[in-house]
Image (cartoon, rainbow, N blue to C red):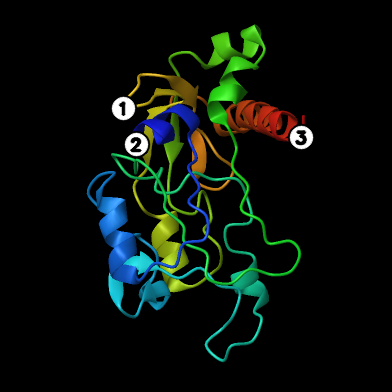
Amino acid sequence: VHQAFLDNGVVVFRDQALTPDQMVRLANRFGPVEAHITSAKYKHPECDDLIIITNRNDKGEIDPFESARGGRWHTDMCYQEIPSKATMLHTLEIPDAGGDTIFANLYLALETMPASLRTRLEGLRATFRLGGNTGRGQGRADKERKNAPLVDHPILRAHTDTGRLSVFVNQVHTVGIVGMDHDEAQALLQEVSMGFVLVQES
C-alpha cells in the first residue's frame, strides 16, 4: 500500500467505517502522526490527532464561513520547516452533488510545464506562512498568522522517499519567492498556478 501511495500520490480505500482510533493506527503505518495546527474548535472530541472538516456551525446549520474552508488549491502543512508527508481523509457525510475533494498532480504539472518556465524556477525557493499574506479574517488568530515567521522550500521540490521532483507552491499558503520583490514574485507564482488549472482541466 505504501508503494502504491508513492507511485500514485493518492490511494483510496472504499467502503470503510473507521473509528478515530483505527484511523490514527492506519495513519501510523505511513509514518508518525502529527496534529494539525488548526484552532482547537476543529479538534475531534475523541482524538486530538484528528480534526473535523464540516460546513456546519455549532448549531448544526450550514455556515458559509465553514463551507469556504479548503476551497482553494493548497498543500496541507507546507508552512512548516518539515512539511507533512501526506494528508489522510475519512468521509462521514457527503452531499448528493458537489463537495468533491479534487487532487492536483504536481508531478504532471512539472512534467508538462514549458521548458522556459521550468528553467526560470530552478534553484528558486518559495516562502510559506499559514494563511498566506493575510489569513482568513481579522480575528486574533488571523493577526498571529500574518505575523508568523516565514519558512521557505524549493519551488521544484524532491520527494523525500523517491527523489521525484514536483512543483511545490499553492494559492493559499505561498507568500513569495526568496530574493524577488513582491510584484515580480506574485506574477511568477500566478504563471505557475495557471499551469495547475490547465493540467486539471485537460
Question: Quick one: SS at disc 3?
Answer: helix
Q: Residues within 10 Å of mark 1 (few under 14, many from 20)?
A: few
Q: Are marks 3 and 1 in contact (CB under 8 Å)?
A: no
**Sooner in the amino-acid sequence: mark 2 or mark 1:** 2
Q: Which residue is mark 1?
A: 160
> Marks 3 and 2: which is nearer the front?
2
Tell me residue 38's x, y (percent): 39, 64
Identify the residue at image location x=43%, y=41%: 128
Task: Examine the rendering and report whether any part of residue 35 can be seen.
Answer: no
Identify the residue at image location x=25%, y=44%: 31
* C-alpha distance separating marks 2 and 1: 14 Å
Q: Quadrant of residue 190?
A: top right
Q: Are marks 3 and 2 in contact (CB under 8 Å)?
A: no
Tell me residue 118's x, y (percent): 57, 13
Residue type at the position of mark 2: His
In the displayed structure image, the side of residue 51 where residue 12 appears, left or right: right
Q: Are marks 2 and 1 in contact (CB under 8 Å)?
A: no
**Sooner in the amino-acid sequence: mark 3 or mark 1:** 1
Tell me residue 182's x, y (percent): 56, 33
Q: Is residue 69 above or below residue 170?
A: below
Residue type at the position of mark 1: Thr
Q: Using the image, tell me which numbered label, if any, was put on residue 2.
A: 2
Q: Is residue 137 above or below residue 173?
A: below
Q: Residues within 10 Å of mark 2 (few under 14, many from 20)?
A: few
**Sooner in the amino-acid sequence: mark 3 or mark 2:** 2
In the displayed structure image, the side of residue 118 where residue 89 appears, left or right: left
Farthest residue in the front direction? 15
Q: Which residue is mark 3?
A: 201
